[in-house]
Image (spheres, helix red, strand yellow):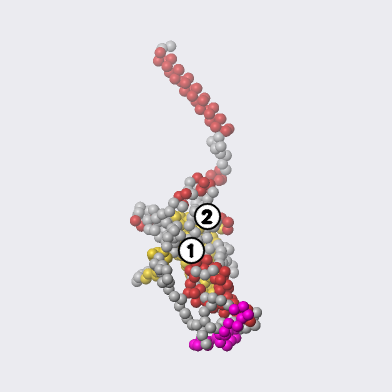
Amino acid sequence: MSQTNRSIVLTFACLVGLLCLVCAAVDQLSKDHLVPPDKKLSPAWVKSLYEKGGPRVYRGAELKPIGMPIGGIGAGQLYLGGDGKLWCWDIFNTKGMRDVRGVPTHANPYRRSEPDRRAHHQIDQGFAVRVTTDGKIITRRLDRDGFRDIEFRGQYPIGFVRYSDTDFPVRVELEAFSPFVPLDLDSSTYPATVLVYTVTNTSGRDVSCELYGWLENAVCVKSRQEGAGRLRNRVVRSPRTTMVAFDALEAEPAPREGQSRPDIVFEDFEGDLGKWTAQGDAFEGNPKPNFHHQPLRGHQGKGLADSFRNALNGDKDPPWTEVWSYIYLGKIYDILGNYPIHIDQIARYSKMDPSRVASILTGLELKGIIHQLPGKMFVVS
């Protein structure tokens, strides 16, 4: 045999040996590997992969972990929750969100309701719908605290949310998106989120409907506790738009010692009630000198309105709790409006003790002046 023939035979033997090694490796792989070559997939299932399907609709517990990105490209991160609430406000150029990214976050995804402020800022925001029908006023928040039957359908870049309960006379549908135009970078990088609500009367009777929205002023959300200042909300109108602009101002200089602003006296009631008219008999007569067996100290003036003692027992009209509530009624009422506001915000803005705020709100609600929504939110009736 020539040298050439021997080389061909040797090469062929090597190829046969290599092929045997590959076959043995594949056989061993099919026995030990987690993903075998023959996956024994159902032919019907494989065929279904090529069939045209419909969008998936999420309901109930499936809504909790949903977070659909709904911010402009390069404009930070913002999620649309399964119930239509906005969360994961990573738009403040802080490193809070960057501390929780990575494999652990994907393995254990955060949910909208988790109270981890380091993971996502809990900006107080939302919408509510108020309907009037048959002489009744009903207000519902447009989230899972206000509706039981909520459906979410995501078709990026648009998210669809539907709210409908059998005991509520209207159906509300939300279409949420950020401008996204393929091959158009400028039109796809707006730091804006568009929320479009459509209300449909499903009751078969006349219904008057209003939509309300609220959004916390989140300027300096991470640093507002570190310095002095005050938040400012302004309504800005133009021929085509009406906006609410948020900003923060420097704190007003504190008065120097000994130069604090004096209290503003509305009335001292020295002698008689003057131009004021008392309703009921809780403050009957004129303020009286301090004849108590345990004289009060620290008060100003010559007389005391002490007939409230009987009002405490319910023997006078109006009850003392109602009289007491009216002292701060104006302060609380100025904070409230036609949009829902949380009781903690009312206490913060009024600089009053939360227990006092709760008592005043209860009195106003009993009189029908305000209405409480789920989640300790209040709105003027």
Residue 271: give its label: none
> What amino acid is found at the position of numbered circle 1 in the picture?
Gln
Q: Residue at x 45, y 78 (%)?
A: 264
Q: Is residue 264 visible?
A: yes
Q: Secondary structure at mark 2?
A: loop
Q: With 311 as the anchor, is 184 left or right in this view?
A: left
Q: Is residue 158 visible?
A: no
Instruction: Work out whether 232 lies above or below 88.
Output: below
* Of 216 and 177, the residue lying toward us: 216
Residue 4 rendering spot, x and y as whole percentages: 40, 15
Residue 252 rendering spot, x and y as whole percentages: 39, 67
> What amino acid is found at the position of numbered circle 2 in the picture?
Asp
Q: What residue would you read off at disc 1? A: 125
* Magenta stretch holds residue 279: yes
Instruction: Work out whether 264 lies above or below 177.
Output: below
Q: What residue would you read off at disc 2? A: 116
Label 1 vs 2, first from the N-terminus: 2
Q: Secondary structure at mark 1?
A: strand
Q: Quadrant of the N terminus?
A: top left
Q: Quadrant of residue 202?
A: bottom right
Residue at mark 1 to residue at mark 2: CA–CA distance = 17 Å
* Of 18 and 157, the residue lying toward us: 157
Q: Residue at x 46, y 52 (%)?
A: 96
Q: Quick one: label 1, few (<14), some, or many (20+) residues within 10 Å?
A: some
**What type of secondary structure mainly makes up the magenta span?**
loop
The span picked out in magenta is 272-295
Q: Quadrant of residue 295?
A: bottom right
* Of 24 and 45, the residue lying toward us: 24
